[in-house]
Image (cartoon, rainbow, N blue to C red):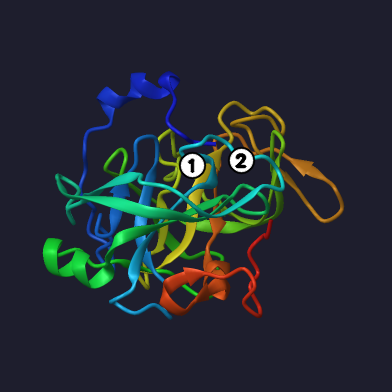
Amino acid sequence: MLKYLAAVAIVATTLLPTTAQAAPNAVDFTGTVKLSNCSGSVVKPPSASVNDKALVLSNGHCYEGGFLDPGEVLVNQSSTRTFSLLSANGQSTVATLRASKLAYATMTDTDITLYQLTSTYAQIQSQYGIKALTLSDTHPTQGASIRVVSGYWKKIYSCNIDGFVHELHESDWVWQDSVRYTEPGCQVIGGTSGSPVIDASTGAVVAVNNTINESGERCTLDNPCEVDANGNVTVHQNVGYAEETYLINTCVDTGNTINLNKAGCALPKP
């Protein structure tokens, strides 16, 4: 997992802020945020109104209370966490957004945290000129060109979706149907956890960046392994992974709330 740790501080001097390179749909830092230890983004489900309170997406392992146990799911918890909203070119912070609550968090089957903000989508756009990223409601596509946009490092990684992993195991955690990145291009590092994975052809968020196999170890912390349907284990050193986000939409209810009791909701439940 890629939460920022002291061990990665040494690389900070070599990662200068960069703007997006020319891309078909000009993916930049619009909608991205910096957390104290991770990256994230302001995301808007297709069903949400511009007048709904906005949501910030990051990783479950970026939760301010620490790593969540396997099987643990948090819903509607108190939080006043703050997020630095970046300018479109990533060169400056245009606002500090604040959570009104932690809407949902888990590290089981997926690795996501959703915070509800005190501001609406319309307020963020009118006051700061930043539009939220659309949360795709369809499964990502193999071979798609993607951008991993890190608000923490102000860096954009470019690669493709290499394929999908039946189960991704890392230490005590298991994630389902994870996205595997092609290499080179997306050698993500600590602090990029929670970065939106954006489909370059649509501009929509299709996954959330969460890990990379750093040293070639098998199924250990910071060294995820792939397990297929027959139980075969494969290790790909220096290959990064993300967790799909389309299933979040199955649980979004009136007022942009997360309702795990909604018919068809496919997120893990407590």
How far from the left and from the top, in percent, is residue 30? 24, 59
Q: Is residue 39 above or below residue 191?
A: below
Label 2 element class: loop
Is 55 situated left or right of 83 in this image?
right
Q: Position of residue 180 (x, y in %)?
A: 58, 52
The answer, for residue 127, to whether it is visible in the render is yes
Secondary structure, mark 1, is loop
Residue shown at the point (14%, 69%) measured from the top left: 126
Residue corresponding to mark 1: 63
Position of 255 relative to 150 (above/below)? below
Which image quarter: residue 9?
A: top left
Q: Are marks 1 and 2 in contact (CB under 8 Å)?
A: yes
- What amino acid does circle 2 point to? Leu
Quarter location, residue 67: top right
Q: Which mark is residue 68?
A: 2
Q: Earlier in the sequence, mark 1 or mark 2?
A: 1
The residue depicted at 34 percent of the width and 36 percent of the height is 36
Note whether residue 139 is visible: no
How far across and how far down the image is residue 175, in percent? 67, 50
**Callout 1: 10 Å neighbours few (<14), some, many (20+)?**
many
90 relative to 138 in the view: left or right: left
Tell me the amino acid under the disc marked 1: Tyr
Please give the name of the residue rendered at 44% of the width and 47% of the height, measured from the top-left corner: 194
Q: CA distance from mark 1 to mark 2?
A: 8 Å
Q: Is residue 14 left or right of residue 104?
A: left
- Residue 258: x %, y % from top left: 52, 67
Image position of 203 with respect to 183: above or below: below
Q: Relative to the observer, which residue lies in front, 36 or 220?
A: 36
Q: Which quarter of the image is occupied by the C terminus?
A: bottom right
